[in-house]
Image (cartoon, rainbow, N blue to C red):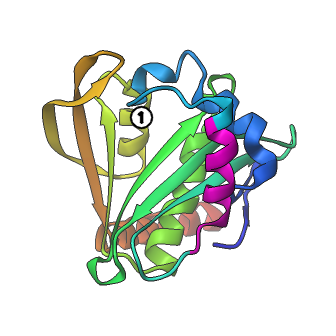
């Protein structure tokens, strides 16, 4: 995906120069309660970020991270990601992390919409899923704003911070997304006529 510029953000591939901002998001105390595994260390990030920045996008399964860059502040404020299945499966799982200082302003929605557009319009995927800890109400609201439907409530399915946690699975089909785009464009046309 080429960088996408919205009114407030640039959604672009993660770069090695994002290391500091990446660490700030990944290790923030308000984000850690929803992250499985041990928090990433600076040494771990120094090895992992160059790998993420260099990942080739092709037909094989791949995990891609896109930086959410705040235009006014000229810094990475979070990330959206997609775990793509093999091309013939035509599916992916999306996710996001946004630094708490920037939450509640619609940035995650803006970035996730760019990612959905990439998945459905450019890659022509059939189905996108997203999962979150059921305690993460901000992510639940975001998935619902994106028009995703809850398909499952998994009981004690992920081990986070020393405890088994429940997860929700949400999904959206390409046909459903296309219908949303059609409705959005229709309502936009009506507003412009009035």
User: Label 1 crowding class (10 Å Cα cut-off): few <14, some 14-19, many 20+?
Assistant: many
In this view, 163 is above or below 113: above
Residue 14 within the segment the image draws in magenta: no
Q: What residue is at 65 percent from the left and 40 percent from the top?
A: 45
Q: Which residue is mark 1?
A: 139
> Magenta segment range?
44-56
The answer to whether residue 12 is left or right of residue 119 is right
Instruction: Tell me which residue sits at (58%, 61%) in the image.
Output: 114
Mark 1 element type: helix
Q: Position of residue 190 (x, y in %)?
A: 54, 65
Question: Which quadrant, please, contains the C terminus?
Answer: bottom right
Q: Is residue 104 visible?
A: no
Relative vertical location of residue 138 with respect to residue 151 in this rendering, above or below: above
Residue 90: x percent and y percent?
Answer: 32, 77
Compare residues 68 and 28 and report the one nearer the observer. Answer: 28
Q: Position of residue 140 (x, y in %)?
A: 35, 34
Residue closer to the observer: 72 or 145: 72
Q: Position of residue 39 (x, y in %)?
A: 51, 26
Q: For this rendering, which residue is in front, 156 or 145?
A: 156
Tell me what residue is drawn at x 74 percent, y 36 percent.
21
């Amino acid at each position: 995906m080429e960088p996408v510029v919205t009114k407030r953000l640039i959604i672009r591939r993660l770069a090695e120069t994002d290391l500091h901002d990446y660490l700030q998001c990944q290790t923030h105390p308000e984000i850690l309660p929803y992250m499985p595994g041990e928090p990433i260390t600076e040494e771990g990030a120094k090895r992992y970020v160059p790998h993420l920045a260099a990942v080739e996008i092709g037909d094989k399964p791949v995990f891609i991270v896109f930086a959410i860059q705040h235009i006014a502040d000229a810094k990475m404020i979070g990330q959206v990601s997609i775990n793509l299945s093999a091309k013939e499966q035509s599916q992916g799982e999306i996710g996001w992390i946004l630094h708490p200082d920037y939450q509640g302003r619609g940035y995650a929605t803006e970035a996730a919409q760019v990612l959905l557009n990439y998945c459905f319009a450019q890659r022509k995927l059939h189905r996108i899923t997203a999962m979150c800890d059921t305690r993460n109400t901000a992510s639940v609201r975001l998935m619902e704003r994106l028009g995703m439907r809850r398909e499952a409530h998994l009981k004690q399915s992920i081990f986070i911070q020393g405890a088994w946690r429940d997860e929700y699975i949400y999904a959206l089909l390409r046909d459903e997304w296309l219908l949303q785009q059609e409705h959005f464009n229709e309502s936009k046309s009506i507003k412009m006529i009035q």
